[in-house]
């Protein structure tokens, strides 16, 4: 259920994402995005902050945040250079990367059942089919150089690795989801500011309001996701959380009265089949 709530929050965050990256370049947004995130989380710190690090966990934390920071840059860059449907579809392969990485982290104590593996595959391919259905019926889209596809694919891979690192931190009770997310926001803000030296000419009341609105859903998305990681396998948790494009799809079907394509119907059936398999596993 935590992963489902993450997917719902992520869906609404996705509705803001494409509009936001049209305002400026990713390098100019990254540090302010995480700075605002830290400011929004800080008032809750007296009640939820918990930190108990040793040398090993400090290395894990640095690795997780480093991978996370690179992945977030890749996320913004993906939507900046590639149309949203293609970028979202490529990002949706993240659970498949997590499946491939699973054998390296068997010491965490979670072994995937065959039904769970099948469900992850059905969820991922179902989302890709739904998104591809959008692209196939749209007007001709601006082409992007092949090298730009490295960013969403690389982002999916980096997010997958970082989730295993974060799970290690939770298993050792070194910190909790809130603390990780707050520290992550502060460090990525500071480091990205020093590296990118962003141009804040795009900042105005309207863009700040849009950024803050998106961050409400992003914070919810990630806190639900990180909480689910404490007990769930990263591949399964990520596969469910990556169903967030369904919110966009259902929005277009219900409110915009867009008719689903056959490919989208097939994708929805694959997702429902994946949910049934997972429930029986």
Image (cartoon, helix red, strand yellow):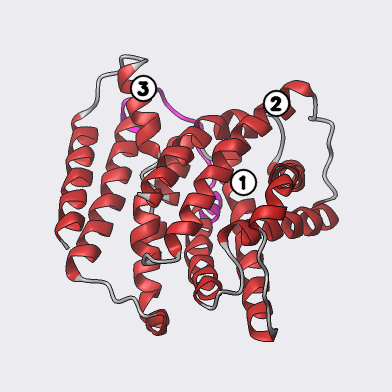
Q: Residue at x 48, y 58 (%)?
A: 227
Give left or right: position of 100 versus 207: left
Q: Earlier in the sequence, mark 1 or mark 2?
A: 1
Q: Position of residue 228 (x, y in %)?
A: 42, 58
**Residue 89 spot, x, y in % from top left:** 40, 45
Name the quadrant containing residue 262: top left
N-term mark: 1 or 3: 1
How busy is the neighbourhood of tag 2: few (under 14 within 10 Å), some, or many (20 plus)? Answer: few
Residue at the far front in the pictured view: 47
Circle 1: element type: helix
Per the image, the residue denoted by label 3 is: 252
* Foreground label between 2 and 3: 2
Q: Magenta span has 21?
A: no
Depth check, mark 1 against mark 3: the one in front is: 3
Describe residue 226's horizontal placement relative to residue 92 as left or right.
right
Mark 1 or 2: the one toward you: 2
In depth, the one of 158 and 232 nearer the eye is 232
Relative to 133, say whether 241 is above or below. below
Give the CA separation, mark 1 to mark 3. Answer: 25 Å
Q: Would residue 143 be counted in the magenta stretch?
A: yes
Numbered tag placed on residue 77 in the rendering = 1
Q: Secondary structure at mark 2?
A: helix
- Residue nearest the viewer, comparing 70 with 276: 276
Look at the picture and state if 5 lies above or below 116.
Answer: above
Q: Earlier in the sequence, mark 2 or mark 3?
A: 2
81 or 61, which is in the foreground? Answer: 61
The Cα atoms of the two marked residues, 1 and 2, are separated by 21 Å
Query: Which numbered dot is residue 209?
Result: 2
Residue at x 38% of width, y 32% of height: 247
């Amino acid at each position: 259920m935590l992963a489902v709530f993450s997917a719902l929050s992520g869906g609404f965050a996705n509705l803001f994402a494409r509009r936001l990256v049209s305002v400026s370049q990713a390098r100019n947004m990254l540090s302010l995005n995480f700075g605002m995130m830290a400011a929004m989380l800080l008032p809750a710190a007296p009640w939820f902050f918990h930190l108990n690090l040793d040398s090993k966990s400090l290395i894990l934390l640095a690795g997780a945040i480093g991978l996370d920071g690179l992945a977030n840059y890749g996320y913004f860059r993906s939507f900046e250079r590639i149309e949203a449907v293609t970028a979202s579809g490529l990002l949706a392969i993240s659970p498949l990367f997590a499946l491939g990485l699973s054998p390296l982290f068997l010491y965490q104590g979670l072994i995937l059942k065959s039904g769970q593996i099948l469900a992850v595959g059905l969820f991922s391919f179902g989302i890709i089919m739904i998104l591809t259905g959008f692209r196939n019926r749209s007007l001709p889209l601006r082409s992007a150089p092949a090298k730009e596809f490295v960013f969403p694919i690389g982002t999916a891979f980096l997010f997958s690795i970082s989730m295993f690192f974060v799970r290690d931190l939770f298993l050792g009770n070194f910190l909790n989801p809130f603390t990780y997310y707050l520290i992550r926001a502060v460090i990525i803000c500071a480091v990205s500011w020093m590296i990118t030296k962003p141009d804040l000419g795009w900042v105005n009341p309207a863009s700040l309001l849009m950024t803050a609105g998106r961050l409400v859903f992003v914070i919810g998305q990630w806190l639900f996701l990180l909480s689910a990681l404490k007990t769930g396998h990263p591949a399964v948790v990520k596969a469910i959380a990556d169903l967030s494009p369904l919110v966009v799809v259902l929005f277009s079907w219900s409110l915009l009265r867009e008719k689903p394509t056959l490919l989208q119907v097939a994708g929805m059936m694959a997702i429902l089949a994946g949910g049934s398999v997972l429930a029986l596993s």
